[in-house]
Structure formats: structure tokens, C-alpha cells
Amino acid sequence: DGDAPGGAAAGGAAPLPDTSNPSPAEAALMRQVHAVLSSEIGIATLLNRLKQSVTSAKEFATFLKKRAILEDDHAQSLKKLCRTTQDNMRRADHRTGSFAQSYEEMMLIHERMAENGIQFAASLHQMHEELIELAGNAERSRKTWKADGLSAEQRVADLEQTMRKSKAKYDSLAEEYDRARTGEGRQGGKVLGAFKAHKSAAQQEEDLLKKAQNADQTYYSHVQTLQTEKSQLESSHRPQAIKALQDLVSETDSATTFQMQKFAAFNEKLLLGNGLIVYPFKNQPGETAPQPRSLRQAVSSINNERDLNEFVSSQHSKVTHSSEVKYEKNPLLNPQSSGAPRPHSQPFAPSGQQGPNVPFAGGSISGPISQQPQSMGVRSSTGNFTGPSGPGSPQHASVPQSPQGPPGPGQGMVSGVSQGGLPDQPRPFGQQQQHARSFSQGNPLSSSGPGGSGGPPPPQYGGRGGPPPGPPPQQSLPPQGSPRYGNGQQPGAPQLGALPFQGGNPPGQHGSPQQSQAPFGPPSGGLGARGSPPQTQLPYRPPSDIKSPVGPSGHPSIMQPGQQPQSQPPAYPSAQGTSVMANPAPSKPVFGVSLAKLYERDGLAVPMVVYQCIQAVDMYGLGVEGIYRQSGSLSHINKLKSMFDADSQNPLLDFRNPESFYHDVNSVTGLLKQFFRDLPDPILTMEHHSSFINAAKHDDDIVRRDSLHAIINSLPDPNYATLRAITLHLYRVMDNSHINRMNSHNLAVIFGPTLMGSDPSTAITDAGWQIKVIDTILQNTYQIFDED
């Protein structure tokens, strides 16, 4: 019975690492390492070490993934912020000049830094994937070597256990044989006396000898098998497993270390790249390639004083040279008896009287309000009135002479009187900014004024053709250079009772407060007083020059003093003292009338109700939570609707005063939505409805935006102008979504069916696409429309 030879174990051990001149501490360390790896715990030790390497690689890979996500989010957010800021800074309400140029360079520098960050994040993500793949391969190899290496170790351990059992049995039989041979078993052994009494001592000794010999053979074979297996384990299986596990550990650790080195290099590259972007290298001597400016240089180049001077000088073309102020005596200060009738119950001054004009004191007749509303794309119906002495000079306005005699007092009129009694310069009411889409212009006023030798001047309708259908207008145009009063009427002699220095009104006549009300909305391109159709409006004319609509020969006929116009019933004094018609003037409906008819009738590309509602919401509703989603008072909406249908120019409908809409801005939004719903043809027109739906189905944002833009450009002029006004307004609402909670999608849900209309057969299927159309238009407002 011999033990396993020690030479096999020594010969099969893993070789010591080749070290040239190790220190004593290192030599002792390597001997301990060799001893552990040569023992039966070597494979288990390396398996545990490989598990640690894999876990560490996975943890570093997780860190790289999260860092890549953070860097990518930061870079993408920075890039988006730069683009948004660039778009905002390019708007007209931001500074220009050197500030804009420096700001643009600063945003480009940040965009390049964002690109660096995106590349850094992509590199980290690639490193994460490589580490995850490495850890997976190491784990699979570990499982394989764990099964092979530990199974060989376990097999040797099992053989060693079997050998120990056989040796114990062999030793036990040898001791029993020895007792039988010496007679010790006969003296005290019950077992021998009880079970083997029939055998003799020689027979018993022989049997025990045979058993001992068999046990010896078994023990010897077990020892031989154990020696063989242990030799194979120590010479082949264990070194192979140790070597493979060492390689896996080394590969995993080396790859993890390499990825950490790459991570450090990428960090340096990121920071150095950002540093070179912020402050590029200067050109070396001999280099001619242009270098971008550094961030400090770009910011230092801002010249605030020059930017201010350039901006102010850019407005030089808008400077108007004021004419000399002259005193003009008003002929009404020397009244004489005259019984000539006047339109709208205004008394005539004596027909032969003529004198210089004087401003009215006391503010009884107010001029235009100083703040003119923006036209929001409204096309001008007429050009600027220009007199012989130059545009906008009321004191030198030409007054055509009547062929029947000298001009009456109506031709020496006040050009416009402010609240303080000083004359106001007349303002052209057709001016507007030029936009990407041009509008057709109305016919300018001809040079022939009333009383000229020619026929009636062309009407001032703002449409593309002639006057709207209906009876022809029965009034004459004012002469060029003459002002337009705030109430829309042609200038005539004011009521004497309206002047503060008069003791009272003539019998039966009192000044109407509405006649002195200043305008509050976009000036009308049509003729006539607000609230009455053109055929009921007559400007002041001398008694000898009032014309009837058409004479027997087809030409305008002359009306005699005291004769009423044919289109107008006789005037009777009312209970309040002002003259009223026998029949009430027909209303000018606004709701339920197409945009084209409103434009032809009123000369406003954006209807007055739309303008007033937008103005009210801009002033009082941008900070109201749920604006356009909340419902207003139905009674208030119906009252305002009736007032607009009766007279859209009513001074009580000036929505700059919140009392005009009962201090309820939600009623204003309800009124605006009601106007759009009542249109016979929606703003985006049923003709283009299917085209808008098909354009909204494009997945690409740019293609969808450009498709919608092309269709919008093909809309009729009034529809385009109104759509532009409401879109720019809703964009301002979106700008305050952090307060009012109304983003582009919420507004599109409300205005989708309102602006596009709906076909009952496809209303359900088109609802989502209608929202998509309006949402896309709102998100691309300044790409589709020019800013105000």
C-alpha cells in the first residue's frame, strides 16, 4: 500500500512565472501563487477571480452606458437650444448688427460643442457594447471550464474516498486474520464461537487469509486508479484549466483596463476639442488659412453704440418733414342764415360764404386715435391721398371748384382735430408692411374731385374688381388731400351745437356723440358712415352741387336746395333732437357672410370682428389659463354678435376697453370661434379640404410643412390674410403656454374643425388629420407667414 507518487504532482504543476531578478518579496509571493494554483483549490480560486473580473467589466459597461445617455441628452438638448435660440434671435423683435452676428457665432460654437458631445456619447456607447460582449464571452467560457475542471477534481476526490474505504477494509481483515492465527480470537470472540463453531481453527484462519488477500487486491487497484487519475489531473486537466482561466482573467482585466484608458482619452479629447472650439489656435507664421474667432473675440466685437446708431439711422426713410403751422379761421365762426338741407341733419352754412379753416377748440370733434392698429396683412384699398402741395398736408389740400359758382363752406373743412384742439395730420389708412404674398391693389383715387367736369369717380372698394353687387353708390368721393373723419363720414360742416362756445343747438338739432367718436379699428376701404350701406351716405356738398344718382339722360343730375337725395327718405327730428330716417337703415351683417363679400363690402382683408377679438385676447387673455378652451357667457356672445351685425364700426365695440366685452375675455374667444363656425365656407375652404388632409398624412415634418405652405399660398386673398392674422395671434398664445396651458396641440384640437370645416361623411376619420394640419401650421408659423 503506497501513497500517490509526489513526483507526478511536482511535474504537473503550473510553471512559475519567468521573472529575471525578482525581489525577495516578489519571489515569496510567486511561490505562494504557484502553491495555490498547483493545489486542488487552484481552479476554484481562478473561477472566483474570473467572476470578479466579469462583474467589474459589467459594472463599468453600465457606467459607460449611463454616461453616454447623459452626454447624448446634454448634447442634443444643447443643439436644440442653439437652434431655437437662433430662430428666436432672427425675428424682427430682436437686436441686429454686431450683437446679432456675435450671438450667431456664439450659437455656432455651442453647436460644434454639442457635436463633440454627440460623438463622445457615441464612442462611450460603442465601448459599452464591447465590454458587454467581452463579459458575455468570459461568462460562457467560465461555465465551460467550471464544468470540465471541477469534474476532474471531483473524480479524483471520489477515487481517493473509495481508496480510503478499501484500505480501511483491508486493514480490518488483516487484523482479524492476525488474531485468528495467534489464537486471540478463540479466547474471547463470541462471534467465532457462535458462527464458526462448526469450522476448525485452521479453516477459519484460511478463510480470513483469503479475505485479507482479496481486500489487498482491491485496495491496490484503487490506489493504482487514483494514482493514474491524479497524475492525469495534475499533468493535464488542472494545468489546462488553470491556463485557460488565467487567460480569461487576463483578457477580461486587460480589456476593461483598455476601455478605461479609452474613456480617459475620450474625456481629454472632448475637453480639448471644446477648448479649441471656444479658443482656436492662432495661425502659425506662414499659415494663411482663416481661423474662426474665439468665443471671447466674438463677444468682444459687440459694439452697442454702433448697433444703436445703425438701427436709428435705418428709420431715416420714415422721417416726415412737418409743414408750417398756419392759423386758418373757420367759416362757422361767422354764421349767416341759410336754410339749405344737409345730409344726416347737419345744417349747411351759407352757400356763398367761404373763409379759412380754424381748429375746433374744446375737443368736441376728435381726430384719429394716436395709436393705429396694425393692419395684419390687410391689403390697402386705396393709395395715400396726395394734394398738390405734397402728401399728408391738410392745410394745403386742393379744393376743386364747383362749375356753378364759388365753393361753399363744405370745401374749407377741418382736416382733423385732436382732443386738445390742435389739427392732426391725416394718416394714410392703406399702409402696411410687405409680406411674402402680395395682394392686389384697389384703384387709386382719380384726380377729378366732386364738381369736376368728368363722370363719377371710381369707387373705393378693396376687392379685385369693381363695386359689390347691389345699387350703385350714390355719393361722390372727397377731393384728394381731404381728410377722412373718424366716424367714416365724408367731411361736412359740424353741428354748431357741438362747439363749446355756442350757447345751444339750433331748434330740433343736437350733436350726436357718435359723430365725434374717434376710429378704433382698421380704417375702412369702402365709403359711407359706419353701420349704414354706402348708398345712404352723402358727404357735404354745396347746395348747388348736390347730385342725384342718375338723371333722365343717364348722367348725374343737379339737385336743388332743399331737395332730398332720391335714395334717402325725408329726415324727421327724433325725440332726442337728432334727425332720424323714416325707415331704419339696413344693417350690415358680419356673421354668416363669406370673407370675400365682407372684403368687397368693407374693404378690410381681416374682418373687424376678427381684429377686435384678437386685440382683446392679446391685451387681456394671454395669461388666462385655458384661453379658447373655456366657454364664455352665451348671453354676452349673442349681444356682441348682434352689435357687430348691426354696426361693426360701433364705438361701443372698441375691445381695447374691457367694458366693451363685459370684462369677460372668454366671451370674446367664444365670439371669434362663432364667427369662424358661421362662415359659409371655412377659412381653409372646402375646395382645398382634401388637399390639406392629404398633406397632413406625410410622415416627414419638412414635406408636410412645405405641402401645407403651398396650399395656403393658393387660398383666396381674404382667406389668406385672415388665416395669417389668426395664426400669428395663436402663436402668441402658444408663447405663453407656460401660463395659459395652451400649446399648439391644444389649440389645434379647438381650431381644427373650426378653421377647416367638416364633411359629415368623413368628419370622424378627418378629425385627427384636421388637428395635424392646424398643429403643423402653428408650429411653423414663421416659416409659412411673415411676422408683423
Image (cartoon, grey):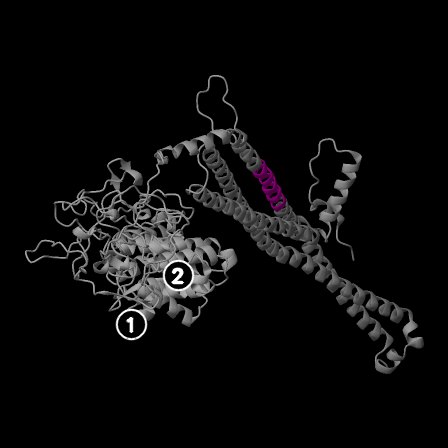
Q: Earlier in the sequence, mark 2 or mark 1?
A: 2
For image coordinates 59% across by 56% down, the residue present is 144
Give the amino acid at mark 2: Leu
Please say whether residue 263 is one of the residues in the magenta stretch: yes
Q: Residues within 10 Å of mark 1 (few under 14, many from 20)?
A: few
Residue furthest out toward the top: 286
Q: Position of residue 72 (x, y in %)?
A: 52, 47
State the image quarter where residue 506 is shown: bottom left
**Magenta segment range?**
251-268
Give the answer, above or below, for where 298 lies relative to 566. Answer: above
Give the amino acid at mark 1: Pro
**Quadrant where the N terminus is found in the figure:** bottom right
Q: Nearer the viewer, residue 292 or 446?
A: 446
Q: Position of residue 429 (x, y in %)?
A: 31, 47
- Judged from the image, the secondary structure of the residue bearing numbered disc 2 is helix
State the image quarter where residue 471 is shown: bottom left
Q: Is residue 351 visible?
A: yes
- The numbered dot on residue 652 is 2
Q: Position of residue 616 (x, y in %)?
A: 43, 58
- Judged from the image, the secondary structure of the residue bearing numbered disc 1 is loop
Give the answer, above or below, for where 668 lies relative to 33. Answer: below
Residue furthest out toward the right: 187
